Amino acid sequence: MIGGKLINRSNWQLTKKYLRYREEVHQLSASSVVLEKRWLRSVLEWAGETPFQDVPDIRPALPQYLLTARKDGSGQELSLAYMQKIIRTARRFFDWLSKHERGYRALTAAWLDTLRPPRVEGQAQKFVAVTLEEILEIAKAPANDIEERRIKAAVCFWFLSGIRIGAFVTLPIEAIDLYELSVKQWPGLGVRTKFKKHATTYLLDIPELLQVVRDWDSEVRKALGDEGLWFAPFSVETGEIEKEYQSVGEHRHSRARKSLKAWLRRVGLPYHKPHSFRHGHAVYSIQLAGNVSDLKAISMNLMHDSLTVTEKVYGIFSSLDVKQKITALTRNRLGNEQDSSDLAEVLEEALRLVRKTS
């Protein structure tokens, strides 16, 4: 039973089998499996006692159902972003079910195509991005002890790199080269990247933020050399970096969040979630982009699979002055022929997204 609603036992067992497949075959991290399990709960609740082979006949259909669904125990409506995650998870699950289990011919490609995020009047996907002005103010704030110096350097690093916090707290010192402004987000070095992606990414060249990062880098390398974590643990008793290497716990990112909250509260600055610094990196970089090649580089540095993913998350074209960009295209056509095919591809995708949301 989920949310006071009876659940088909076979459906529940199939979701468990699918999650094992995702973990063992697709090599999803434990945290990603937990998230997919949460999103599949909404699918189980929607199906209720109806077996999955009959779900194409359920009314309301899943997208419409999500408009009236509520988060467990909170009574809150689901955000557009949350509904999108449920829909994407449902599509992957039912596609897997139709291919790997017998008796699910009703889950056709045509039906899977109907699993699209619902239209939501007046609601757009929103995210909070730390601005350049905000991060520069944070970089000027006093840090009175080792914990505050560490978290101050961390937030500057987040903005400069756009790194996810799960990867950041597992970065070994050897993965960071401030001379080259490079960061080796390599699972082989123990870095916990999303979907275990492997990439070398780069820092923005913002002197005020880099100085904070370099100061901590010098401090942590003096204590540990190239061994150990850049977000190094320290002793509460001595106030010094612990020199014995410790493996990273599953909830290491929670320590960073707590330190950030405490420090920003003390210095009188508003709190931002760690991911808001990643958003800030992306938005600031996009604002500086001059052509499609720049946008592709930004997308790769965010470790997105394609520029289309970056557009969906950050709305590249809606965040720019569209009228100015479009009217300038013909004036610039002679000097930008090498970008024409790439630009056409991205514009086509952007227009498709605009039509979907209009």
Image (cartoon, rainbow, N blue to C red):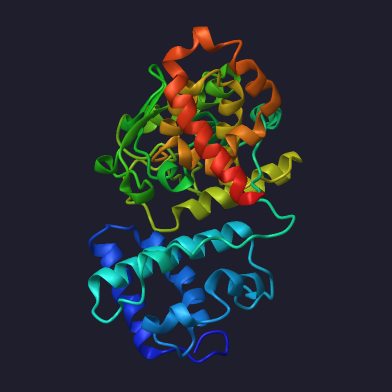
At x 51%, y 75%, the residue is 42
Q: Residue 342: x percent and y percent? A: 43, 26
Going 24% across and 42% down the picture, which residue do you hit?
A: 188
Q: Is residue 106 above or below residue 182?
A: below
x and y percent of residue 37 in the render?
42, 70
Q: Is residue 178 left or right of residue 273?
A: left
Q: Quadrant of residue 53?
A: bottom left
- Front residue of 131/326: it is 326
Frontmost residue, 269 versus 312? 312
- Camera sees residue 34: no
Residue furthest to the top in view is 335
Asked if 19 appears above or below 242 in the picture, the reply is: below
- In the image, residue 34 sits, relative to residue 234, either above or below, namely below
Q: Which residue sits at x=35%, y=77%?
A: 106
**Position of residue 324 measured from the top left corner of the image (x, y, whole percent):** 69, 21
Q: Nearer the viewer, residue 278 or 153?
A: 278
